[in-house]
Amino acid sequence: MKFPYSEKVLEHFRNPRNVGKMENPDGKGMEGSPACGDMVAVYLQVNPDTKVIEDVKFESYGCASNIATASIITELAKGKTIDEAKKITWKEATEELGGLPPVKAHCSVLAVEGLRSAIRDYEEKHGLVSAQEPTTEAVVRSRLKHVMNPMAGLDIVRTELVTKIDVNDGNVRILLDLPSNHQFAAAIREDILEKIESLWDVKEVKVVFTE
């Protein structure tokens, strides 16, 4: 039986490049795949004048394909401008690795989405988003679908932790069906703030827990 991974996939799995958390990144993105439990966080350091990605790091939780694709994505992105990096595709990543088993193709998609999420975070924080869509309940809900519920391995919207979203004149209020003293409450709150506070017209975000 032929081994499903190429030598290059195994090399990036055994010796991944650019691993680790970046303190005070210019942009950060996190994406997860509830289907298999894989998650990827991408951190960027961007030159403010040239918009070139000078450094990029990742943290990954998942299978060999997940780690290898996140590793190759960071290699492809480093040295590119943010506009160039946005054009990196999952097919390009897969080809760079010499192919992936079809059942693991979503891992390359996950890594690319993590990179794009980090770039979007950078652009929003630095006022580089050209089409400034007003923040609505639907926009907030869409962002919250990228906040994971550690208890279930699914996002907080699908697991119905979010019970209500109010958006009024730049003030966002999110009600969660979770006690404030829960072991994951602080981490979920921090992740929500990261996802919502960067929106261009948001003034304040309040996360309200059940007592």
Image (tube, rainbow, N blue to C red):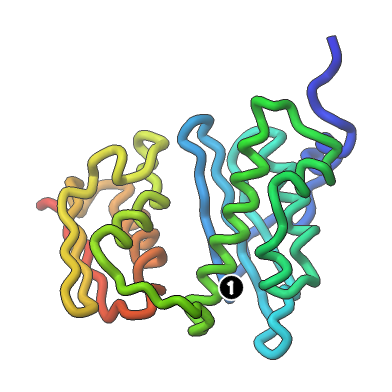
Q: Position of residue 124 (x, y in %)?
A: 48, 76
Q: Is residue 166 left or right of residue 129?
A: left
- Vertical order, 147 against 97 (above or below): below
Q: Residue at x 77, y 41 (%)?
A: 94
Q: Amino acid at mark 1?
A: Pro
In the rendered image, residue 130, in percent from the top left (x then y), is placed at: 50, 80
Instruction: Indicate the quadrant where residue 140 lies.
Output: bottom left
Residue drawn where x is 19% and y is 79% of the image? 169
Q: Quadrant of the N terminus?
A: top right
Looking at this rendering, what residue extends furthest in the right direction? 7
Q: What residue occupies the far front of the structure in this picture?
A: 131
Crowding at label 1, few (<14), some or many (≥20) Cα neighbours within 10 Å? some
Count of numbered marks: 1
- Could you say which quadrant of the image residue 58 lies in? bottom right
User: Residue at (58%, 73%) from the top-left corner?
Assistant: 25
Give the residue drawn at x 58%, y 53%: 113
Locate residue 167: give its quadrant: bottom left
- 116 and 65: which is toward the camera: 116
Q: Where is residue 106 drawn, in percent x and y?
A: 61, 37
Mark 1 lies on residue:
25
**Most distant residue in the left direction:** 211
Up the image or down, 71 lies above or below 127; here it is above
**Is residue 134 positioned above or below 102 on the image?**
below
Give the SS element for disc 1. loop
* Side of 32 relative to 132 (left or right): right
- Which residue lies most toward the bottom here? 49
Q: Is residue 25 left or right of residue 132?
A: right
Q: Position of residue 108 (x, y in %)?
A: 67, 43
On screen, residue 183 versus residue 50, left or right, reads left
